Structures are given as structure tokens and as C-alpha cells.
Amino acid sequence: MRKVFLAILAFVATVGSAQEKAVLVVHGGAGTITRSGMTPEMEKQYRDGLEQSLRSGQAVLARGGSSIDAVETAIRVLEDNPLFNAGKGSVFTHEGKNELDAAIMDGKTKKAGSVAGVTIIRNPISAARAVMEKSAHVMMVGRGAELFATKMGLEIVDPSYFWTERRWKALQRELRKEEQQKPIGTVGCVAVDKNGNLAAGTSTGGMTNKQFGRVGDAPIIGAGTYAENESVAVSGTGHGEFFIRWTVAYDIAALMKYRGMTVQQAGDEVINKKLKAVEGEGGVIALDAKGNFAMPFNSEGMYRGWIGSDGVPHVLIYKD
């Protein structure tokens, strides 16, 4: 009887410790984000949006759900919020269209899925997951991705769904300037569940006034999105061309695996040294299987936050 009792205590302790390390981290984009440029009302809206995303993802983890489910859930909340450059709030291309990209990756199996240049899928992160789980491919683009999403029964909307006055005015300003495009926000999430499995996801509307069918780093596995249980889950935001050329997400994973760096050390090395040295602006959220996370960025601000098993959301926006 004593052995049975001790076995039960050991099981409870194991479950308890596993639950404790369930963590979820989100970002809502990096760039020129300062207190002087933000009204109190707008700041509250951003904070509320991030908190809603954190709580929705954490609710999945709290009931024993997988990190993949939590990541998809949290990102869908941000995609449906017009404040963020993903889904409903996506920016406009030079032609006045909304072209959306997204990716998701399972750290346990290293399966991944992504979509790029889609215009009628309400939640691209769900389309990316469908590619991962219901096709033999990793990436689908444009019309083919849209046909696949339709076949999978995902919610399809008229392109006008993505029209917002704020983003339209931003395009008009850029067209009047006709200057080099500036990087603009993305949303993302990384999570570890009670079983220690990692997942990462990223979704974006790209750059305002982008041309020529440009695709950034968000849907590129190893650049803007990456997850593997042996190292880290990463979601990036910033100037995508730099994230692609420097394979930012996987570089962080490699530094942890092969040089024994912590998640904070690896994130700082890539974001605040390698990228900063070449004027590559942006940031990442990174999380390991033990629940340790980092949120380094080299821009003026990054919408970001985290939540643990206590259910208390923590949100940050500015550099200090």
C-alpha cells in the first residue's frame, strides 16, 4: 500500500511540474513604437488585444491542450483584430490588395505548413496548419493555397473583408512618398504544453506598398518561424529580407543546440548583434521546452507578452 501511495505522489508531482512549465508567448509586431506616438486609448486597445490572445491560448494549455492548438488559437485572435498587421488588419500592397502569409510548426515532429500571398482566407494560420496536417507539402501559395483551404472547409471571405480605413490611409501616404518600403508588423506565438512539446506560428499582411508579389520571412520555415523540442520555438517580426538571408529563427536554434547558449543568449546574439550590425530591424519571441523564454528586439518597440500556468497575462510594448 505504501508503494502505491508513493507512486501516486510521484505521478501527481510529475503532472504538477509539467503543468507549471506550460507557457505561451505572443508578439504583435516590432517597429517604431513609442509612448510619444501612442494615445492612451490606442495603447489600451493594443494591450487588451494582446491580453485576449494570451488568455485564449493559455486556456487551451490549461485544459491539457497541445501547444499547436494553443498557438493557432492565440494567433487567430490577433488575425481577427484590425489593430495588428495580420488577417483583418493586413496592410495593402502597391496595387491596393491584401496579401497574407502564415506558417506554423510542430516542435515534436518538425512537421510544418505555410501559405503565402492568399487573399480570401480569413485565418491564414489555420490554412497553414491544414497544409501541415492534411497535405504532403510544407508551403502553398496564391490561388493554389486558396483552393486547398476551400477544399478543407476553412472560412473564405470576400477580399473586401480585409479593407480597413487605417491601412488604406497608410498606403496612400506611402504612395505619395514613393520612398523605400519600411518594415511593418507581424503577429506570432510560441508555446510549450504540459508534455514539453513546443510549437511556433507567425502570420502577417506583409509590408505597406509592397510590389512584385513580395513574400517575407513569416511563412519561411527557419527564417521567421521555427520549432523543435530539442532547442527552441521562434516567431519573428521585422524586416523580412534580413530574417530570410540570416535564417534568423534557425540560427537561434543552432546556437542553442551546438554552442549550448540559453534562449536569452541566443536571441540576443542574433537580434542585437548579427542583425543590428547589418541594420536588420526586428525582434523575436523564443521559448524552450523548459519554459524559459526571451523577447529580444532592436527596434524602438515590440508588442509582446507572455502567460504561464497562473493565468496572469503580462504585456509590454516599449523598449523601457
Image (cartoon, rainbow, N blue to C red):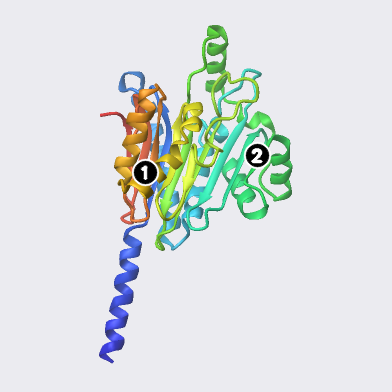
Residue 113 vertical position relative to residue 209 in the rendered view, above or below: below
- Image quarter hosting the N terminus: bottom left
Q: Which residue is mark 1?
A: 255
Residue farthest toward the bottom in the current orientation of the protein = 1
Q: Position of residue 301 (x, y in %)?
A: 35, 27
Residue 136 placed where, x, y %?
A: 67, 52
Would you place residue 138 above or below residue 204 in this image? below
What residue is rendered at 51% in x and 54% in y? 69
For discs 1 and 2, the disc positioned in front in the rendered view: 1
* Amino acid at the residue labelled 2: Ile
Left/right of residue 2 with respect to residue 233 in the rendered view: left
How many numbered badges does the structure rendering display? 2
* Residue 268 occupies quadrant: top left
Q: Is residue 112 above or below residue 146?
A: below
Instruction: Estimate how packed mark 1 is, as few (under 14), some (14 to 19) or many (20 or more) residues with alpha carbons within 10 Å.
Output: some
Residue 189 location, quadrant: top left
- The residue tagged with tag 1: helix, strand or loop? helix
Q: Is residue 260 left or right of residue 146?
A: left
**Location of mark 2 (residue):** 121
Name which of mark 1 and mark 2 comes first in the sequence.
Answer: 2
**Residue at 46% over, 52% down:** 228
